[in-house]
Amino acid sequence: MSEQTTEAAPETPQPAAVDPRLLVREKGFAGYLEEFARRVRGGELGSLPVIVGLLVIAVVFQLKNSSFLSADSLANIGVYTSGMGIMAVGIVFVLLLGEIDLSVGSVAGVGAAVWAVLSVTHGVDDWLAVVLAIVAGTAIGALHGFFFAKVGVPAFVVTLAGFLGWSGLQIWLMGKEGSINTPSGSLVENLTGYYFEDKAAAYGLAAIAVLAYAGSLLLDSRRRRAAALPSRPLSEILLRTGVVTVIAFAVAYVLNEPSGARGLPLALVLFLAVLVVADFVVRRTSYGRQIFAVGGNAEAARRAGINVNRVRISVFAVSGMLAAFGGLFIASLSGGATKNLGAGNTLMNVIAAAVIGGTSLFGGRGKIWSALLGMLVIQSIQQGLNLLGMASEIQYMITGAVLLAAVVIDSVSRRTQKTAGRT
């Protein structure tokens, strides 16, 4: 009896499943709109709430007082945003870890005190005194990180102790007089007192910002195409670049008004430089990816070979460094270093700026530019209320309400993403 064998028909290979979200941009601008709507429905709001908030603030205060969008007003917002904005960048680093730093105000005070005592009292070279002040802030931050990462003390407790301890050191450094005035023409005075009066400076910076932004978008799109990944369509790149162009040159035009401000503030240039460098570190380096990994899940990051302790210590060092640098801006604005520099609502405004700008309190999510957006919201509210003659207690209440709204949006957004299966 012969056996009859039958060959099985070869199976038709099934195409690999592709996430439709990766293909949506191939549809061009319509795909971009589809993706944007999908992200909003999924709770990925990004910077949308704060941008809408800024537009509302600008419209409301401009209708109440036509001076709100004047050159002097915008220049004041830029200058007063710079110091605490730089400190807020450091807070964004810490929040990305899912931690908090309550010592930034007192570290800012210590940084200003170190500079004042060295430069003004003891005649140390101004540049060297500034460098040593920033180094002191970096060392303080690293010390906080050491106790948190190596010893295991919660960051909240470590930095709260630092807030008290460094405030005492600040008072001791300032001595009996309690304040040291900033010398005329000094480096620290020029941080917020110097303006580029040449109109080419503001327009040149606007042009550089637009070209750099467009170049980064084109480079990212080229790299994704080379890796056979969906990339932004040209229409989206042109739209984004157009929006940035309008904003950048509009601000430059207002700052260069003949009857307006004195030109482009140096403080704003330095703040933008800090933002660009910090954003590059966080988004374009392996160190930045390690920060996100540790903030998302420290144990998973450790098993992946990341030195979690090193990342934590370095992040707190960055926070201390930027706190000290920001303290020099505050000293410049207030006319000198004092025993109370960095006290009051400085800490709350710095943390509020990072959170209002879109950085999550739960770690692992946020952008460096949150510091700029958040400080713009806070300072715009303060500037508008000052123009309307509102009392400071009203400013506190409104800022607190905005901060609460930002945290609520973050919490609801995370819950929406979890429901949509995106976390």
Image (cartoon, rainbow, N blue to C red):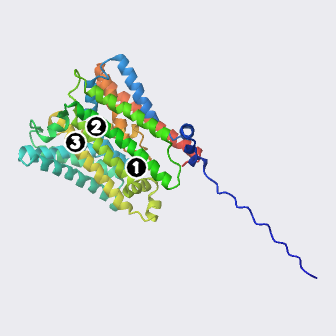
- Where, quadrant-wise, is the N terminus in this rendering? bottom right
* Quarter of the rendering containing residue 352: top left
Q: Which mark is residue 327?
A: 3
Q: Amino acid at mark 1?
A: Leu
Q: Amino acid at mark 3?
A: Gly
Looking at the image, which residue is at 24% across and 33% down?
200
As drawn, 390 above or below 31? above
Can the viewer see residue 46? no
Which residue is label 1 attached to?
Answer: 96
Mark closer to the observer (2, 1): 2
- In space, the residues marked 2 and 1 are separated at their CA atoms by 29 Å
Toward the bottom, the furthest residue is 1
Q: Earlier in the sequence, mark 2 or mark 3?
A: 2
- In space, the residues marked 1 and 3 are separated at their CA atoms by 22 Å
The reply to whether discs 2 and 1 touch (Cβ–Cβ < 8 Å) is no
Q: Is residue 66 left or right of residue 416?
A: left
Looking at the image, which residue is at 23% across and 39% down?
342
Q: Which mark is residue 205?
A: 2
Q: Amino acid at mark 2?
A: Leu
Q: Is residue 253 left or right of residue 338?
A: right
Q: Residue 282 at what x, y percent from top left?
A: 37, 51
* Quarter of the rendering containing residue 61: top left
Looking at the image, which residue is at 46% across and 48% down?
221
**Crowd band around label 2 with a 10 angstrom C-alpha radius: few (<14), some (14–19), many (20+):** some
As drawn, 204 above or below 418? above
Mark closer to the observer (2, 3): 2
Looking at the image, which residue is at 19% across and 38% down?
191
Looking at the rendered structure, the secondary structure element under dot 1 is helix
